[in-house]
Amino acid sequence: MQIGAHVSSSGGIDKAIDRAVAIGADSLQVFTQSPRAWRPTNHDPASFERFREKYAAAGMGGALCHAVYLTNLASPDPVTYERSVATLRNTTEVACGIGAHVVFHVGSHLGSGFEAGLEHVVPALEQALELCTDETWLLMENSAGAGGTIGRSIEELATISERLDGHPHLGVCLDSCHLYVSGVDVTDPAALDACLDEVDGSIGLDRLKALHINDAAAPFGSNRDRHANILEGELGEKLGVFLSNPRLQGLPAVLETAGPENHGPDASEVAKTKELRARWLA
């Protein structure tokens, strides 16, 4: 398992590699623009080559670009929808430039219903998928939200995959916290294995390309997306069940915790996670 972290890309996207190396990360995730603004960052193309060079030199095990939080591919509002599609396409173009996968939340149908939401989601993803390559996939992240949020269950993600005819560049990213607060007890080996069986049977475990490693600050089944630092939340020591599962090895596993200073994961968070995994593997 390539345990890493979400790091800043300020000052040039290649600087993210430097920050990841500095905290002992074996994989990394970045935003390609401000996560709370629609305007894309105008990246210097030379920074893409520098990213690739540093990535290779560091021996990183995986790179992810996370789409901005504003993205809602299921939105019935035409302005939000148009902006969401454009933003996802831009994120995908940057990811292709640096050789990374794209992780995204599908969004919310805002009360219009799952089927109505899919009428927006499918054509939106078709546009972004046409940009993808064998090096860059779109990865649907399981979500934790309540209400009209799409992607809280493996079944919903599988339906999207089916509507896109199992597109060869559409995959999945599983988040330990989101699974737990959505009612999948990742601290129970049997429950986690059942979840992975469902992924394998409905989407294909070969399409699971990345993991998000987060403890949960909200109770089991609460559908509240609240991350906690490693060993400080509801999962605690038993997050090791997720980290040590044989079918999850070999994947980039990125921390999205606040860290001790609320500036994101630091070296201590990465080290804690690696030590926790080692304990459970032993």
Image: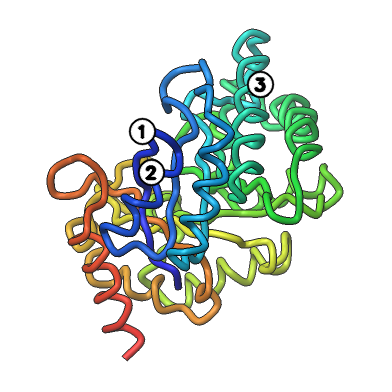
Give the quarter of the image for residue 215. Answer: bottom left
Residue sitting nearer the eye, 82 or 51: 51
Give the quarter of the image for residue 172. Answer: bottom right
Q: Is residue 95 visible?
A: yes
Q: CA distance from mark 2 to mark 1?
A: 7 Å
Q: CA distance from mark 3 to mark 1?
A: 22 Å
Dot 1: what SS?
loop
**How far across and how far down the image is residue 69, in percent?**
46, 29
- Image point (55%, 77%), residue name: 247
Of mark 3 and mark 1, the one earlier in the sequence is 1
Mark 3 or mark 1, whichever is nearer to me: 1
**Can you tell which mark lies on residue 10?**
1
Q: Residues within 10 Å of mark 1 (few under 14, many from 20)?
A: some
**How far across and how far down the image is residue 179, in percent?**
45, 55
**How far across and how far down the image is residue 213, in percent?**
38, 58
Dot 2: what SS?
helix
The residue to which callout 2 is attached is 15
Cβ atoms under marks 2 and 1 closer than 8 Å: yes
Q: Is residue 4 above or below residue 14?
A: below
The residue positioned farthest toward the right in the image shown? 165
Quarter of the figure that contains the N terminus: bottom left
**Can you tell which mark lies on residue 86?**
3
Residue sitting nearer the eye, 180 or 248: 248
What amino acid type should be assigned to the residue bearing mark 1?
A: Ser
Of mark 2 and mark 3, the one earlier in the sequence is 2
What amino acid type should be assigned to the residue bearing mark 2?
A: Lys
Cβ atoms under marks 3 and 1 closer than 8 Å: no
Q: Horizontally, is 29 left or right of 100 in the view?
A: left
